Amino acid sequence: MAEKAFTPRVFSGIKPSGGLTLGNYLGAIKRWAEMQGKGLETIYCVVDLHAITVWQDPADLRHGTREVMAGLIAAGIDPESSILFNQSQVPAHAELAWIFNCVARVGWMNRMTQFKDKAGKNAEKASLGLYAYPALMAADILAYHATHVPVGEDQKQHVELTRDIAAKFNHDYKVDFFPLTEPVIEGPATRVMNLRDGSRKMSKSGESDMERINMLDDADTIAKKFRKARTDPEPLPDSLEALDNRPEARNLVSIYAGLADMTPEAVIAEFAGAGWGRFKPALADLAVEKLSPISDEMKRLMGDETELDRLMARGAERAEAIARPILEQTYDIVGLVRSR
Ligand code: TYM
């Protein structure tokens, strides 16, 4: 069957648990903002249903959802030109996820590295939701027939599974209904690493706060975290290849490049031969310059929860208008009788 051409449409999501990190910003949010205004429809979602796959205190979840919504707007996502909302207000996500639970195979889920990492040795005690999480993520994307999904490197496997689900659905029902979505993993900082251990990803859930930069950290905290970031004794080299076996050094160069909108090569050209005593303060100053306007605006927006809730409701209505007809067609294809 010839592949149908789908209108390009961008979708991505972020969990509202544990605040925003520099990894979220450089790997995802900053790039989401840059994809606006290029003639593509852009849809961004605070995925609260994903958050509850591990325990969330209800008050923290409510707060976190509004805080991430504020963070996205503060970082440049315009709730008019993009569709911006929280997942649970558009029931099509959960409904389509059920269909996809019946399409995806247990063997596919067993290969998901994120489940293995998160469930750890105690997989028997993990929630069923955590295991089925990638099918909900496929539903998030495919409920909009999204063709492009900007994410950090860690989400690549989930987007590939989304393609597998779309392909199996299309094959089983002999339709060309769901697009084969492309992950868009671009830029100098698609995998921001932990500041204390260059072999691990920077994440919201790491034990020590010194491992990560939070979007709400103040200038002194940012400077302290970069000053104390693990590095090696060597100065910065004059080529990027020379950083291949220096993960912590490579990470700080990538972060600098991401914040400055430079290539890592250009950062190396500027700082070749510099010691950490010069590079780290320059990095801290750059981070404060770029992040503090965002955190100030985030705090300001958090002062008006009614307005944030109104924006989420409006975004959800616009999202629903796209997702509901796609879900109804899916039900038809599957053979579910819709008589009212
Ligand atoms: P989440 O909430 O863990 O992260 C949100 C986005 O931030 C990126 N990211 C990073 N990028 C670079 N370096 C890092 N250290 C780093 N940490 C996080 C993630 O790659 C992601 O793009 N399952 C998803 C949320 C989701 C989703 C979706 C994404 C649900 N449905 C549909 C895309 C499309 C997640 O847990 O992201």
Image (cartoon, rainbow, N blue to C red):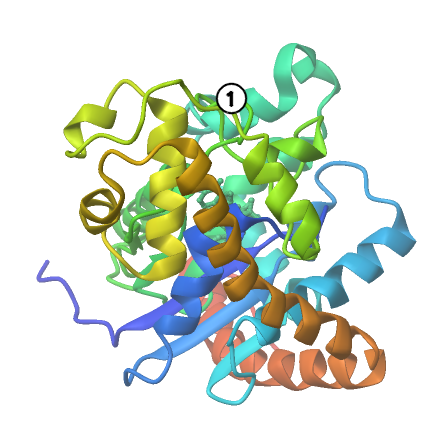
Residue sitting at 45 percent across and 48 percent down? 283
Residue 228 in sight here: yes
- Total labels: the figure holds 1
Front residue of 137/227: it is 227
Left or right position of 331 against 149: right
Left or right position of 153 against 2: right
Residue sitting at 74 percent across and 45 percent down? 52
Quadrant of image for the N terminus = bottom left
The yes-or-no answer for disc 1 within 8 Å of ligand 1 is no
- Image coordinates for residue 33, horizontal then vertical, percent: 43, 72
Residue at the farthest bottom position: 80
Mark 1 burial class by Cα count in 10 Å: few <14, some 14-19, many 20+: some
Residue at the farthest left position: 2
Residue sitting at 50 percent across and 41 percent down? 134
Quadrant of image for the C terminus = bottom right
Placement of 314 over or under 176, stated as above or below: below
Front residue of 197/99: it is 197
Left or right position of 128 against 303: left
What amino acid is found at the position of numbered circle 1 in the picture? Asp
Left or right position of 14 against 17: left
Residue sitting at 47 percent across and 65 percent down? 143
Residue 278 falls in image quadrant: top left
Residue 91 falls in image quadrant: bottom right
- Image coordinates for residue 268, horizontal then vertical, percent: 23, 42
Placement of 285 over or under 30, stated as above or below: above
Placement of 285 over or under 273, stated as above or below: below
The residue at which mark 1 appears reads as 197
**Mark 1 residue element:** loop
Residue 99 in sight here: no
- Image coordinates for residue 239, horizontal then vertical, percent: 15, 34
Front residue of 229/325: it is 229
